[in-house]
Amino acid sequence: MMDEDAQMAAAIAASMGEHTGHGINSQHTESADGAADENMYSRSPEFQRMLSSAVSRENAELNAQRHIIREQDEEYQMALAIDRSRAEMQRQEQLEAERAALETQRTLEERDARREKIARRVPAEPQAEAAQITELAIRLPSGKRLIRRFRLNHTIQSVLDYVVTEAELSEGAFDLLSTYPRKVFTSTPDMTLESAGLFPKAALIVTER
């Protein structure tokens, strides 16, 4: 710092010397006298004020540069934090989507497994010429009409199971009833078709709950 101050003092002194006619342009001034003049001028109040002003300007520029660097660093850190937050959010969304997909797949697999189990309970359809049979016409909520033969000793549950497999309705999500006389059969799954009076033919409708 002392070398820099001395160099600055010399430069200012030289400048002032040129301005007053006592600088390096004077060919007859001895070097020792010039050094003494510079040393005396460097101690003068005017020189000290000029030196202080130059140092203040330099410090102000350094502070301004530090402030800019600090702001840039803060902006970079903020942008980095935003990127990390966005990446974490995307990761969480992907994990949630994967969990939802797995849950949907599991639900479908469980539904299909239940439907297959129910389908195995549906009795084989008897031949048209077989004895002790009935023919049911079942209208689904979609408007589709099913025609199916059952034996008289088959139960209402057999018809419900058949509807589940054919209409792709969930078990327990619909009612099975006759229109005239109006009667709901869903609540009596163990009743035989003969006991229910559903022979030799009967018309039934399925309504979703």
Image (cartoon, rainbow, N blue to C red):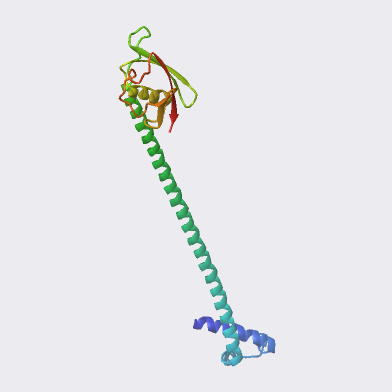
Locate residue 25 relative to residue 137 in the image: left or right: right
Residue 92 lies, with reference to residue 204, above or below; the image says: below
Left or right: 117, with 143 as reference point: left
> Could you tell me if residue 147 is visible in this image?
yes
Quarter of the rendering containing residue 125 = top left
Q: Position of residue 144 (x, y in %)?
A: 48, 22
Snapshot quadrant of residue 129: top left
- Which residue occupies the foreground of this view, 175 or 100? 175
Q: Residue furthest top?
A: 129
Image position of 190 with respect to 4: above or below: above
Residue at x 59%, y 88% (from the top left corner): 49
Q: Residue at x 34, y 23 (%)?
A: 156
The answer to whether one can see residue 23 in this image is no
Where's residue 202, x and y in %?
A: 41, 17
The C terminus, quarter of image:
top left
**Which residue sits furthest front?**
181
Position of residue 200 relative to residue 208, above or below, is: above
Report the number of numbered marks: 0
Which of the pair 114/58 is nearer the observer?
A: 114
Residue at 40%, 32% (x, y): give it: 173
The residue lying toward the viewer, choosing from 164 and 60, is 164
Residue 145: % across, % down: 47, 20
